[in-house]
Each structure stands twice: as structure tokens, then as C-alpha cells.
Image: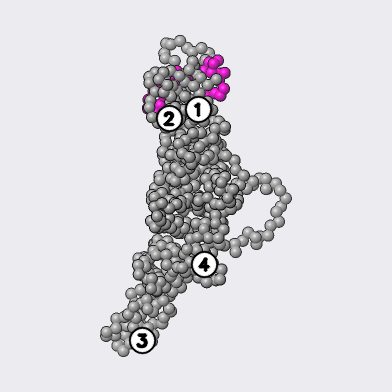
Amino acid sequence: MSDITEIATVVGVAPDLIQIELDAGERYASLDPRLEIGSYLKISDDDAKTVIVIVQSYRIKDSPPGSPQQEPGSPKFLLDTQPVGRLEEGRFKRGGKQITIPPTHVEIASSEVLSEIYGKGESDMEFTFSSLAQDDEVDVLVDGDKFFGKHIGVVGSTGSGKSCTVARILQKGIERSEDQGKRSVLNNSHIVMFDLHGEYAPAFPDARIIGIDSLRLPYWLMNSEELEEMFIESQEQNSHNQVSQFRQAVIENKERHAGSGAAGVSYDSPIYFSLEEVINYLTNLNKEVVGRLEEEGLPKLKDGTLVKRRADHYFEPQEFVEQSQSKADKAGAGPFNGEFNRFLMRLESRRGDSRLDFLLAPTKDDQSEFKTADLEELMERITGYGQDRTNVTILDLSGIPFEVLSIVVSLVSRLIFSFAFHLRRRRKTDEQELPFLVVYEEAHNYVPQRQGARFGSVTRSIERIAKEGRKYGVSLMVVSQRPAEISESIFSQCNNFVAMRLTNPTDQQYVKRLLPDNLAAITQALPTLERREAIVIGDAVNVPSLVAIDEITDIPKSQDVKVHTEWQKDWFDVSIGDGLPG
């Protein structure tokens, strides 16, 4: 029985609250299913207007002083319910008209009604990755265009099933149509994922996996912020001199290697420059000696050459004349002499770190350097093009040194946005679109709430996608177990959220504040959700929903080590060398 009109009376109506008095006697005891927090009710009036509400809370009704006490075993309850939408001609619509006073009919929403709410939408591009938690026979449809075309936030504590949820969403999102499967062609989905722990490869068997051994990101692709984060210590007293001269050296070296195409070259241009030659330039500045004889006043080399333009000489190692106070060969220290000792040590240390070869000394298969002409090939690998095309590119960052993690994420994010930006501007109006979804796993590691110079470039790169990306077909999925630690300007741009169990009170409050729909009956469940349960809220669903994520076959490699189980096994005689770096 779902009709509870005889035992349920509407006693209060407001725009965001409908209060129902419920007689919990024998009739209530026979209900199947029983009411619970999060249950849906259908409230109607004599004009056939129907409102759908969700049970938010309840309490036992107090008897006024002097009134007859309620019969034992038959208490009355007051249910606080929140309206979520209305039914019109069999279709569910959010918000809308109020019912007339008084409402006359109350019933528990049946599976058929729930199917009207969750199983029917207005888009042909709907897909599903979950079922309703209260009724697993009701699939929750999601508008794919609104979901993937706008930014997505996926949050949940460790062990809540977050990785499997992300994998399930993406697997369903890129699923080929039956016709495409018959023709053995890829669809036009494009996903680039930053995988910090190397766990998603099993979930996407056909993905292109780019790990530390195959990742090639030449340093000359970095922009000014990334270069300076990489090489310059902002706290040093003369950091402003380091920045200005490093910038000058890079620009002039790019012009040198660009040749006839040097017009319009800037510090941020993705054009090849030689790091070794830039270091030579700064080394020469650091030991520069200026001739002080009459009509000199210029840097003076050991052979007597006066340097009128540093870029003509300083990209090769040079020897200068000795400093002298004598009238015959008077010469003194240049303006930067001795200023860059620590700076040069840092540059050489970075360049000599073999862990950073993918960034500072990447080579092609023939051991030659990547040059400007190779930019197209580099972009093909990141975007899934080239040979063995793929819908999903996974950047396995588990082997990336943490000190350059944010730079790598910033660089790749910026390249994807720049590619989409220029492609959109150059394409014809009637040409097919090329949309990208960029997935940031464990985003709190590189876009923290409290930034600092170290995370400046990556925060700005991702913020630009968050604010402008949708115009050019680039959307993002931010995944984190600590949402309160992520830059709020990024999370606040998300239109859809998949919120799983959160045990930290700060994270709970942060997410509740960001969620676009203030439904306490649902959001209060955040700390008590089961594994693979989630709250789905946003433009892409008909109504905020508590769902159970579907099981998947190809799962990420994210299972925790079963510590006590492993302890009970016989001693593992491992080779210690297998656990050492190198």
C-alpha cells in the first residue's frame, strides 16, 4: 500500500517546507515499504496538482498541556519534508507551482513515480552510472551534455569507492554506440587524466598510458611562471635580478634558434631554447668584467673584445680580462658579477638530476633533442592522436618527483587549453567540435586552498579552464578526498557534484556550502554513506539523488593492502634491492 492519506495530514505548507502529521498506529505498521529519512512522498490537491517531496526529518508530536494523552502504541509524528519538484502530465519538473490549500492526498512514491522522476528526461544524450539507493530497480538518468559539458566535482574519503565511481562514470561516458562497435571505429570522446597513484590503467585497457619512462615534456614548453617556479627561489634577496636576466637570456636564445621566425617571440612562446646556452649566458654575467678605460665602459673579453651586445657572445663560455685598478688596463666587476652563484648552482643541480630528464633533457628515439617542429608530435601523444588513437590518455604521475608535480600538471593543462582555444578559433562554424574532459585525481595535492608561489602556475592554469574552458570545449573533473583543501575558485565553478562519504567535518561543511541545491535530507547523509553510495547533485540530474554506483568489471588498482591478512602469512623473503630507487 502506498496511499497513506488516511494516516497522513498536511499541517503546514511553505515554499521550502511541507509538514505532515503522521499517525503511527496499526495502519502504519502494515506499510511496505516503511517511511525513512530520504523517502519520497507524492502530495496532491483536488485540482490534480502534484508535488514531490523528500522526508527531511521527523519528531514525535508533543501533546498540548491539558489535552488527552495519545493512546499507548499509537504516537503521532511530525514529518518535515522538502519539495523537490512537481509532476505535470506524467513528466517530472524541478521547482514550480505550489499546490492549493489544503492538500488532500498523500502517498509514498511508488517505483513507477520514481521512474517518472529519474527515468525520463528531455535529452537524447542521457546515460546512467547508478541506481536509486532507495530502489535499485530505478536507474538514475544523467544528461550527458550537461554533465560532461560543465565541470564536475567528485569527492569522498578514502575507502568510499571514489576511484571505482570515477572509472564507472568515464567508462559509461565514452561507451561506443552499437553502430560504432559494428564498424570498429572510435567515437569522438577525449579524456586526459592525471593519475597520481598509477591506479587507473586496469580500468581503461585501451587507454594510452604515459608514465615516467615514456613522458616527454621539453622544458621549452613551459611558460614564464613555470620556468621561474622550476629554477628561481623567490625568497632570495636578488631574486628580481635572477628573474630579469633569466627572462632576457631565454627570450634572446629563443630568437637565436627561431631564426627567420623570430618575429613575435616572447618569454611564453612554445619555442625551443637551449638550457645549456642560457646557463652559459648567466655564467658569463656572473663573472663579467667591464673595461674602465676611456671610451670603453663595456664588458671586455680576455682577447680585448668589447661586448656591445651580450647575446652575440654570452651563449658560449667566455673568459674576461682580469680586474685591475691600473691606468693601463683598468677594469672592474660587471653589475651582476658574483650575484648568481646560488642561482647557477640550482640550475646545474636541476639539470643534473636524472629524475627530471623527462623535462630538462628529453630525447627522441634517435637520441636527438625535441625542437619546435616536434610540438605537433608531442601534442598528439597527450591528446590521444597519432598512431594507435585512443579516447583516454592517462598521465601516470606516480613516478614524478613531487617537487615538479604541480609544474607538470600546469604545463599539460595549459597545452590542452591552448590547443582547444586555437582550434576553436580557426575552425569553420559548421565543423565538428572536439571536446576534452581533463580529470584531476587527488587534486588537493597540486591546487591547494592556501597556495604560495610553488602552486601559482598550476592554480592559474586550472582556474582558466574552470572559468573559460567550456567556451572552447574543455571541461574538468576535480576528484579529491579533501575538498576543503582545494582552491575554492576552482570548485565553485563546478555545476555537478558526486559526493561520497566524507568523514572530516570540515570537508562536510565545505561541500554542503558548495552544493547548488540545499537539500538537508540528502546532504546530512554525507558522513554515513555506504561504500559506492553517493549524492548526485547538479544541472545534469532531474533532482538531487542518493544513488548506488553500478558495479564495474574493469576496476582501478586502488585496493588497500590487507595488512593483518598479510601479516599472518609466512615471511616474505624479498630482495631489498627491489625496493630501492633507481
Give how far apart the Cα atoms at labels 1 and 2 are: 12 Å
Give the camera-side residue of 4 and 19.
4
Which residue carries the number 3 mark? Answer: 304
Q: How is the image coloured?
A: one colour
- Quadrant of image for the C terminus: bottom right
Q: Earlier in the sequence, mark 1 or mark 2?
A: 2
Q: In the image, what residue type sits under mark 1?
A: Val
Q: Is residue 452 visible?
A: no
Which residue carries the number 2 mark? Answer: 85
Query: What residue is at 55 percent from the left and 15 percent from the top?
Result: 26
Q: Secondary structure at mark 4?
A: loop
Give how far apart the Cα atoms at labels 1 and 4 are: 59 Å
Give the class, few, some or many, for how many residues have Cα within 10 Å of label 4's Cα (few <14, many ≥20): some
Q: Which residues are magenta?
A: 9-37
Query: What residue is at 49 percent from the left and 13 percent from the top?
Result: 70
Which residue carries the number 1 mark? Answer: 113
Contact flag, marks 1 and 4 (Cβ < 8 Å): no
Residue 362's disc is: 4
Q: Comparing marks 3 and 4, which lies closer to the viewer?
A: 4
Give how far apart the Cα atoms at labels 2 and 4 are: 57 Å
Give the class, few, some or many, for how many residues have Cα within 10 Å of label 2's Cα (few <14, many ≥20): many
Q: Secondary structure at mark 1?
A: helix
Q: Comparing marks 2 and 4, which lies closer to the viewer?
A: 2
Q: Where does the image place residue 102, in percent across and percent down from the top left?
A: 39, 18
